[in-house]
Image (cartoon, rainbow, N blue to C red):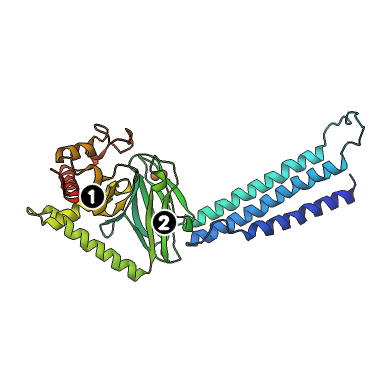
Amino acid sequence: MTRATLGRLIAAMLGLTVVISVVMLQIDWNGTAGSTEADDVDLLLDVMIVLSAFVYSIVLVMLGYSIWRYRAKPGDESDGEPIHGNTKLEIAWTLIPTVIVLFGAAYSWVILDKIEARESDRMEVDVTAQQFAWKFEYPDANVTSTELHVPVDRQVAFSMQAIDVIHSFWVPEWRVKKDLVPGLTTHVVATPDREGSYSLICTELCGIGHSTMRAPVVVESQDDFDAWLAKMQKAQGGQQQAGGGAVEEPAEEAQAGEAIFNEQGCSGCHTLAAAGSTADIGPHLDEVLPDRSAAEIKQSIIDPDAELSPGFGAGIMPQEFGDSLSDEELDTLVKYLMSSVQGGK
Ligand code: CUA
């Protein structure tokens, strides 16, 4: 191969790199960006696309050149020349990928370091995942919610725990993603910079309800967020007081029952008209509960496999509600379910 040929091949590789890169960068791979981290992650992806286009161009150009230049003439059935390798070529094809990979690793490190840095004014939120629901706690305000509300333009630090199996935290518009592992507390930060409604999606296959394991995410102004938090605080403060009192108003008791139903993730799997839930991983409670006694309902919560509804297999419903709920909570939940379906005997 002459120097001129090599020059033309390299020019073809660079030209093809530009063409492929331009086409690939037109595509909006990640969708709407909704956090400051997203901008860094998207830039990293763009750089990786250009590097990949370069490697792909080298392969395509050399493949095309070899097919064209070294194609056997019709009727030529002789063997190829015996060759003993080419030291310069081998050094080149070792060095170039090494440099590319090291650059990619170093640049990713820089981005990761940047997006994981903690801001001093960050807000803390505790996240709990279990089959198949999310729960969010705002420790400073002592508020628990099944919706994730966060103020815009402020870093949020999530401390996350899984109760049963591995789940994964992902809001596509924020780009960051992190697993929740039973027995560990994992951490992830995000700085939402775009107001709106999004979805938190579980991205670790965690059981039969995995695809429904989502939670609403609301990014709002600091004022709206403060108002929401104050409203939640008021509602839940009232509930705690009611729980401690000797006599409960029926309405408050129902509210407490519904809160348990949502917080424990029941609403993630069961349809119950009174709670507004529409999931169908487990039996529709409006259909199966009306002819159950309180004792039967209680048994189904703490030992779900003892008696299965037709069409539902064993081991689908979490087995640990007997441990995670206090006797009082269990009673409140059973009463709530009985009153919700109105037919319990
Ligand atoms: Cu939780 Cu998938």
Relative horizontal placement of residue 278, taking residue 199 as reference (left or right): left
Does residue 260 sit above or below 78 in this rendering? below
Does residue 301 sit above or below 238 in this rendering? above
Around disc 2, counting alpha carbons within 10 Å, would you say few (fewer than 14), some (14 to 19), or many (20 or more)?
Answer: some
- Say if residue 121 shows up in the picture: no
Around disc 1, counting alpha carbons within 10 Å, would you say few (fewer than 14), some (14 to 19), or many (20 or more)?
Answer: some
Q: Pinpoint residue 277: horizontal percent, then vertical percent.
A: 30, 52
Q: Amino acid at mark 2?
A: Ser
Q: Quadrant of residue 111?
A: bottom right
Q: How many labels were placed on the picture?
A: 2
Ligand 1 image position (quadrant):
top left
Does residue 62 sit above or below 49 in this rendering? above
Q: CA distance from mark 1 to mark 2?
A: 22 Å
- Say if residue 216 shows up in the picture: yes
Residue underneath mark 1? 260
Q: Quadrant of the N terminus?
A: top right
Q: Residue furthest left?
A: 246
* Of callouts 1 and 2, the N-terminal one: 2
SS category of the residue bearing label 2? strand
Q: Quadrant of residue 220?
A: bottom left
Q: Pinpoint residue 334: horizontal percent, then vertical percent.
A: 17, 45
Question: Any mark on residue 208, and which?
Answer: none
Relative horizontal placement of residue 192, taking residue 135 as reference (left or right): right
Q: Pinpoint residue 246: horizontal percent, then vertical percent.
A: 7, 53
Q: Amino acid at mark 1?
A: Ile
Nearer-the-camera pick, 4 or 343: 343
Q: Are marks 1 and 2 in contact (CB under 8 Å)?
A: no
Q: Pinpoint residue 156: horizontal percent, then vertical percent.
A: 39, 59
Residue underneath mark 2? 199
Q: Residue drawn at (31%, 54%), measured in percent from left and top?
A: 146
